[in-house]
Image: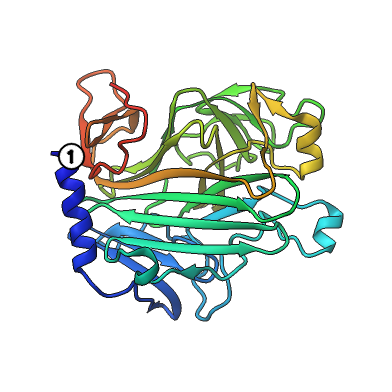
Amino acid sequence: MKVIRLILILMLFISMGESIAEEQIQGRRSIVLDNEKARLILDIAGGSIPEFRFVDSDLNPLNWGRRNAGDQPSSMGHFLCCDRWGPPSDSEGKNGMPYHGEASKVVWRALKDEETKQAGFHAQMTADLPLAGLTIDRSVTLATSSALFFVSETIINKNKLGRIFNIVQHPTIGPPFLDENCVVDTNGSRGFSQDGLMPNPEEPEFIWPSAITKKGHRISMRRMRDIEEPSVTSFAIDEDLGWAVASNGKMGLLFGYVWKQSDYPWFNHWWKLKDGKPYARGLEFGSTGLHQPFSVLARKREIFGRQLFEHLDADEETTKSYACFLAKIPKDFTGVGKLSIEGDLLVIIERTEKHPRKIKIETDGLLDHYIKVY
């Protein structure tokens, strides 16, 4: 049955005929993928994902960043950090390397139907990072009948020599979905603050959902109900399947990500207040948990047994993937305690001791290669 379903999906892609057409969304070149349930927007200049929502609602969790009109690259909603996470060295900065790397600072190219042989629910994009000497090939597939999309990204080293690099997904949620009622849950475990000093920046250590504010106070990271902003914090993922979910019962909406720990062993987190109210909250996951230039990462090498960078030899490539999803939830939903993949379903289990409710999302087999957790 699963093979038949995938064949039918492929036939649907081909039958839709036209090449993937760019659209103008708020004055920006974009690709729009939609089905009967959800609408997904991919921005061309910078490669951001500025919108993912149900078609019957204007509530967009990725409502963050300025969607300026024009063709200038911009970091909005969910953007990509590559070839690094955080600052360049002073010398690299003088040579033009931007903060978080070039991936969100260049114009991506949308591949046409004659190149991808697919359309409709599927899009392919590519970007060249000239200073880093890397190319990123991105494949995005929206499920046919649910609010879930799957992204696969291949990073290719075009340099004549090998080099170290990092890749971090940088989703940021904003109001009105983000407010004092919004709850964030993850299966991250041991964590530390980016304010720590070398050679042991991971001290003091804490366990999710605990974190330390810039003033040194311990708080819970589940809700933004404290008036202090925490430092950027990083948490190791111990399970084979990593996940992070933001839920807002008052808004009736849940938004989250799932990925393989072998692809992204770190969950990185920050939030920003404006006039004492929730303004931005980063749900980042990636190949590093230390927000420093490569010279610092090379000296430190690892934290909590997790490596802080990856290496690509000349002409070598590596592929990483994740899925993003939406679900409607009851107003008294208390948060997420567990997430698993069961056959063609993504199963989200409520965080409560008594009678936890389950939310099931059809995956169309897009996560078949992921590790199943029962």
Determine the residue positioned at 61% across, 36% down: 233
- Residue 152: image x %, image y %? 44, 49
Whether residue 56 appears in this view of the structure is: no
Q: Relative to 310, does residue 45 appear above or below in the rendering?
A: below
Residue, x 59% and y 58% (percent of image)? 135
Q: x%, y% of residue 275? A: 55, 56
Dot 1: element: helix
Badge 1 is on which residue? 2
The answer to whether residue 259 is above or below residue 241 is below
Residue at the limit of the structure toward the right, as seen here: 91
Identity of the amino acid at label 1? Lys
Towards the viewer: 205 or 165: 165
Q: Which quarter of the image is occupied by the C terminus?
A: top left
Tell me the quadrant of the picture where the N terminus can be found.
Answer: top left
- Of residues 278 and 150, the one nearer the viewer is 150
Q: Position of residue 262 (x, y in %)?
A: 51, 31
